[in-house]
Amino acid sequence: MGFNAILGKISFIGQYPFVRYALVVGVLIALCSSLLGVTLVLRRFSFIGDGLSHVAFGAMTIATVLKMTEKMPLIMGITIVSAVLLLRTGQNTKIKGDAMMAMISVGALAIGYLIMNLFSTAANLSGDVCSTLFGSTSILTLTKGEVWFCTAMSAIVVVIFILFYNKIFAITFDEDFSRTAGTKAGFYNLMLAIIIAVVIVLAMNLVGSLLISALVIFPAVSAMCIFKNFRSVTICAAVLSVTCAAIGILVSVLAGTPVGSTIVAVQIVVFFVFRISGKLAGGRVA
């Protein structure tokens, strides 16, 4: 298929509302994920996204069994509470944060799947589970209301990140010094935990529960292969994440491949390109 033919096909499918909805939501979620991803990778908190995504899966199964028409509020509420509790208990108990996160992650995934098997009346249980875990079709079945909700939540996340950029930068690199300087590190950590939970729930529609970590980690790590300045890494990660999401969605629609897996595959390719480019350049730039 020639380049002009591909452009023609993209122009044709762009006429369908579900494709436009998927692109808008996908780009916004990718942007939010990349902004948080840089902070999480630098603080070695990348596993939080994976754990909370499994909590969101468990919440999704509860909402499904209860036959709720609007599942998002329940899922987001449970995920936010879990993020806050994880932050609080991880600081005040003998169980280390990574161990607690692993316990929550595996436990929520197992309980969620058990609930679906015990109570779900769906004719295609395996298909529903696969779609939730890997995001095969959910991004292509968004309603206009869901698009507006995702847009509003994404806008809030971006605005908060911009407004508190300096504080986030400070606690990312030296939380102890930030506390000494009078920064309310506990408050900003709590704010980050809530934002992470919101982004995780939104990202379930894009790549599914099991692939959310890739959306958070790959753009940040790829940008770090070239840049070393926090702002440069953040901007580069945002551009890469948005580009990969848009390409992945379009390729998925054109080739009929799963959306989430396609986006992650594009991110993997980009990571290796940046990795090799960074080595050839002899190091990272400012």
Image: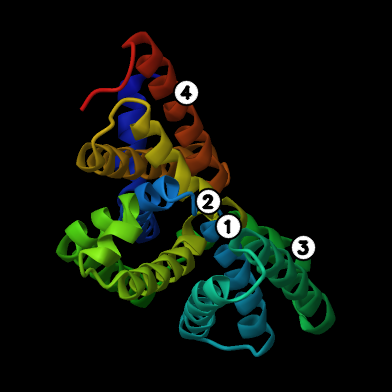
Q: Secondary structure at mark 2?
A: helix
Q: Position of residue 255 (x, y in %)?
A: 52, 36
Name the residue carrying label 2: 213
Q: Is residue 82 left or right of residue 229?
A: right
Decide: is 42 above or below 70: above
Tell me what residue is drawn at x 46 percent, y 60 percent. 203
Q: Are marks 3 and 1 in contact (CB under 8 Å)?
A: no
Dot 2: within a 10 Å radius of its alpha carbon, few (fewer than 14), some, or many (20 or more) residues? many
Point out the tag, 3 or 1, that comes first from the N-terminus. Answer: 1
Point out the tag, 1 or 2, that comes first from the N-terminus. Answer: 1
Point out the tag, 4 or 2, that comes first from the N-terminus. Answer: 2
Tell me what residue is drawn at x 52 percent, y 85 percent. 74
Q: Position of residue 179 (x, y in %)?
A: 29, 66
Q: Nearer the viewer, residue 20 or 15?
A: 20
Point out the tag, 3 or 2, that comes first from the N-terminus. Answer: 3
Q: Name, please, the residue furthest toward the left.
A: 163
Name the mark on residue 272: 4
Dot 1: within a 10 Å radius of its alpha carbon, few (fewer than 14), some, or many (20 or more) residues? many
Q: Position of residue 216 (x, y in %)?
A: 44, 50
Q: Secondary structure at mark 4?
A: helix
Q: CA distance from mark 3 to mark 1?
A: 21 Å
Q: Are marks 4 and 2 in contact (CB under 8 Å)?
A: no
| Residue type (three-letter) at the residue carrying disc 3 | Ser
| Residue type (three-letter) at the residue carrying disc 1 | Asp
Q: Are marks 1 and 2 in contact (CB under 8 Å)?
A: yes
Q: CA distance from mark 4 to mark 2?
A: 17 Å
Decide: is 86 above or below 264: below
Image quadrant containing the C terminus: top left
Q: CA distance from mark 1 to mark 4?
A: 22 Å
Q: Is residue 180 left or right of residue 74?
A: left
Q: CA distance from mark 4 to mark 3?
A: 33 Å
Name the residue carrying label 3: 126
